[in-house]
Image (cartoon, coloured by chain):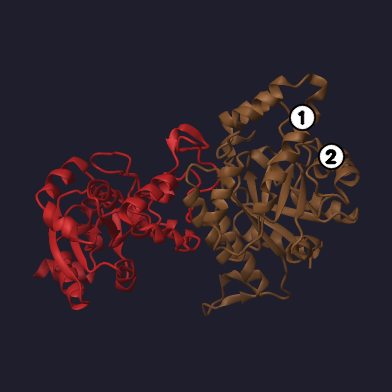
Chain colours: A brown, B red
Amino acid sequence: MSQLQQQLEAGKFVVTGEIGPPKGINIAPALHEAAEYLKGNVAAVNVTDIQTAVMRLGSMAACHLLIDRGIEPVFQLVCRDRNRLALQSDLLSAATLGIENVLALTGDHVVMGDHQQAKPVYDLDSVSLLDAMSKLESGTDLGLDMKGRPNKLDGAPKFFKGCCTTPCSPTPEAQAIKLEMKVQCGAQFVQTQAVYDPAAFEKFMKQIEHVKVPVLVGIVLLKSAGMAKYMNRSVPGVQVPDHIIQKLTDAAKEDRAKVSVGIAAALIRDMKPMCQGAHLMTLGWDHCVPDIIKQAELA
Amino acid sequence: MNATERKPMAEVADSLADAKKVFLVACTGCPVGCDTGGPKWVEQMTAELTAAGKSITGSCQIELLCNKALVGIKLGRFVEKLLAADAVLVSACGVGVQAVGNMVPRRAVPALDTICLGDYQGLWPGEERCAECGECLLAYTGGLCPVTLCAKSLLNGQCGGTGDDGTCEVSPDRPCGWKLIYDRLKELGRLRDLRRLNAPRDYRKLAIPDAFRRTTRYALEVAEDEQTPADEQEAAE
């Protein structure tokens, strides 16, 4: 059983971190950051899968390299780039590399990235991908044999299956219903899109009260007022309130990292009673993670 | 002409499971040629659904349901009977079913699967698009097609890419298809349909037999020599 699963089952407030593989094979800096600032501070480290459709080194290889360094990964797996054959095959491959935590995602559309001409796949969606994972665990795959029975696997994998949700979506009810479907199809934990509005989050958590699944609230570290405004303009389902933007605007340049950490820690303190953990997306500022944890009074 | 095939009766029954009263709409364009619609279908379906304990509030046959303006005018004459129904069962391609769904505040349920449109998107092309997937899901998506309206053709609800103004992440000009579906299902009191797990598509259905790609003219000029025994019998009668 993965550490992440153990800690959530033990009822601990769990923190996860995140790294993004590089565009190229120079992975040493990302691994160094993870070993230096995330190891020992977080239960597991998510590895993004070609995030925002910008071509880069793969999530599975980076997860494997983290395991080699004693860091537990969460393998993010998107439906954008692989059909059902490749998704299932990659899941089997991941299992043989010792990867247990998998986060099933739809994936940003290719037009958001740097290969806009590419063919978007979406053969499965995040719900049917979770269903596929559950089937693999039970020893069958999505295909059928000549007699119409599910194909049998020679050795079944075991995962700790995660999914995402967007609490501040313009249609939270639709998100809540989809989350319910994901849990029905096997999701065992949730890491949310970034939340900056504790009141909206509390409302969303009420809406999914009947769904028994641990939720890690998503915290994206705001590095500047410009970034916050960009997120409001361009990242669907994320709203940074004006009072937070003002704090970043007022901060002197040399204090900015401190202010960013303070904002993230305050959000975690506010939302800790509502959920089971926090997922920190620091976008390269991994060195801030120990401070966020300390100021959020989680250490 | 576009090609459709009848959904198995069990599937139609499932999609009408909680509808006691049904109104029938039949396209008398392409489905007549495929023997999947028209007067014969109305007669058969009335008998089958009545036998299954449903009441038929009325029926209407429209030549080319893909002409949305015509659909509005024609259906206008049946307002009371339409509103008396819990669902409207439509024998048409995906474009026709969506045209009915956009005109009537009732659930439009497809009786057919569309297998080939031959690039024809209706007489009066509007926002209703059919992808000829051969596994029509309109019964469970408020009569709005997720395959064509969602930029990712997702089958199980919206992703995280819905903007605050309800647009899709791919373009500010494009509404989120699943938000449209959510809004419509809410209007129809059918949010439970969002809880249905839709299986991954069967892409074999995209391999369309050549015969369906041929035009009527081809059929008249070239295929005359390829008459089937059924054709000969019909000709003899």
Q: Nearer the viewer, residue A249 or A110?
A: A249
| Residue at x-position 44% and y-position 48% | B178
For mark 1, what is the residue?
A259
- Say which quadrant the C terminus of chain B sits in: bottom left
Chain ID, mark 2:
A
* Residue A218: % across, % down: 67, 45
Q: Nearer the viewer, residue A92 or B170?
A: B170
In three-dimensional space, the C-alpha distance between marks 2 and 1, rounded to whole angstroms, equals 11 Å
* Residue A130: % across, % down: 61, 62
- Badge number at residue A276: none
For mark 2, what is the residue?
A291
Q: Nearer the viewer, residue B196 or B36?
A: B196
**Which kind of residue does numbered mark 2 sit on?**
Asp
- Residue B222 relative to residue B63: left or right: right
Label 2: which secondary element: helix
Tell me if mark 2 has few (under 14), some (14-19) or many (20+) residues whose alpha carbon lies within 10 angstroms of its own.
some
